Image (cartoon, rainbow, N blue to C red):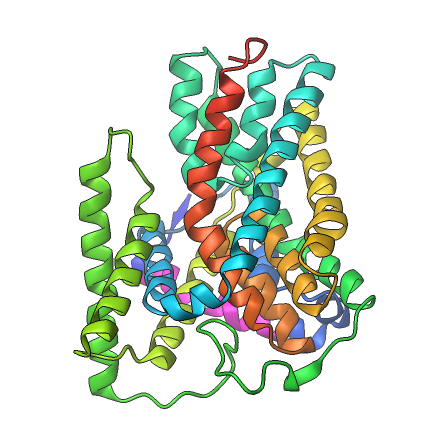
Amino acid sequence: MIQLDFYGTLVAASLVLLLGRKLVLHVGALRAYNIPEPVAGGLVVALSLLAWRQFSGMEVRFDTSLQAPLMLAFFAAIGLNANLASLRKGGRAVGVFLAVVVGLLLVQNTLGVALASLLGLDPLMGLLAGSITLSGGHGTGAAWAGTFSSKYGIASASELAIACATFGLVLGGLIGGPVARFLVKRVQAPGAQHNADDPPLAFELPEAQRLITTHSFIETLALIAVCLMAGSFIAAGLKGTALELPTFVCVLFVGVLISNSLSALGWYKIFEREVSVLGNVSLSLFLAIALMSLRLWDLAALALPIFVLLLAQTAAMALYAIFITFRVMGRNYDAAVLAAGHCGFGLGATPTAIANMQAVTERFGPSHLAFLVVPMVGAFFIDIVNAIVIKLYLALPFIG
């Protein structure tokens, strides 16, 4: 086994991003289907490492200790750039999109339980391959896996949860672009002038040049560090209580509180452009590390019934985004971008959703609504409503 240390992993992640950029630039199919650069580069590396393992018997492992801080820094950036006035402006859209998201949770769990029963599996395994690991991701999957093993006797629940969440992360980054491409053909793509009168949101234009100074960089870095520290402290205090929340939700909440409190008191104005730069860097590196360190052989080892179930969930996500998300959110360009984002966190995670939307808007034009709604729903509300939905399904007599 080859083990790369912290520095080797950071170098590899940087090279993955550069490779992804080159691939998207020179491979027409990747560009046409709006595949995010970290996804393109990360999957090529993951597939190469899979082939290396098959032929040489040697495995390459990365130091993923940087992955969690990068993810938390990304959510801190979302929180720091979450202006309450803007959130109120998009309040109705946030509510409607949240209802759409809840509908998907119900679809994923109903489909998972039904197919598991038809395939001769325990219905609980269908639930584990439903919203727990797909809309919930690795964190929610790992949290519930212990309960499924100890309380319900599901063997290898942790391994199954990780494999399902990994499958979702890969497919969430792959189907968002094609879904958006299919939908954009049916609307009038507005181009670069769309939302031109309003300043871009934090993650909306990752390629835009922004003026940064050493002093402002240190100020912004300090704010993100405070969000990480305070959010981690709050999450630790809530652990084991009825109000327990994932650490990234607490970090995001602290960011919102700090940003809007400082603004209301007139003490300090958040340098949104710099927050967006640090947030985008964290996002790109997080996705690069997550994708290049995928253990694709774990997916290959999935039993055929589980693999069939996950393929069905992927098809359901694409169809739901096209026929429900797109239509309910207005059947326009913003709705198409929202559908791409929904594919990202409906199967994978919020960072994947942002990367999906960036790939679409970089080509067809900005969408303020999508970058306002998706981060808040995908980062904050999804875990709360998902926990409620999961508990409701577990209360059903033929499941729990």
Q: Is residue 319 left or right of residue 99?
A: right
- Quarter residue 347 falls in: top right
Q: Is residue 163 above or below residue 396?
A: below
For this rendering, which residue is in front, 283 or 374? 374
Residue 112 at x, y percent in the picture: 64, 26
Q: Residue at x 49, y 41 (%)?
A: 137
Whether residue 93 appears in magenta in the rendering, the answer is: no
Quick check: can you spot residue 298?
no
Residue reaching furthest to the right: 186
Residue 279 at x, y percent in the picture: 38, 68
Magenta segment main secondary structure: helix
Q: Residue at x 29, y 49 (%)?
A: 250
Q: Quadrant of the N terminus?
A: top left
Quick check: can you spot residue 186?
yes
Whether residue 15 appears in magenta in the rendering, the answer is: yes
Residue 75 at x, y percent in the picture: 37, 59
Magenta segment? 7-22
- Quarter residue 197 falls in: bottom right
Q: Is residue 273 left or right of residue 119?
A: left
Q: Is residue 294 left or right of residue 61?
A: right
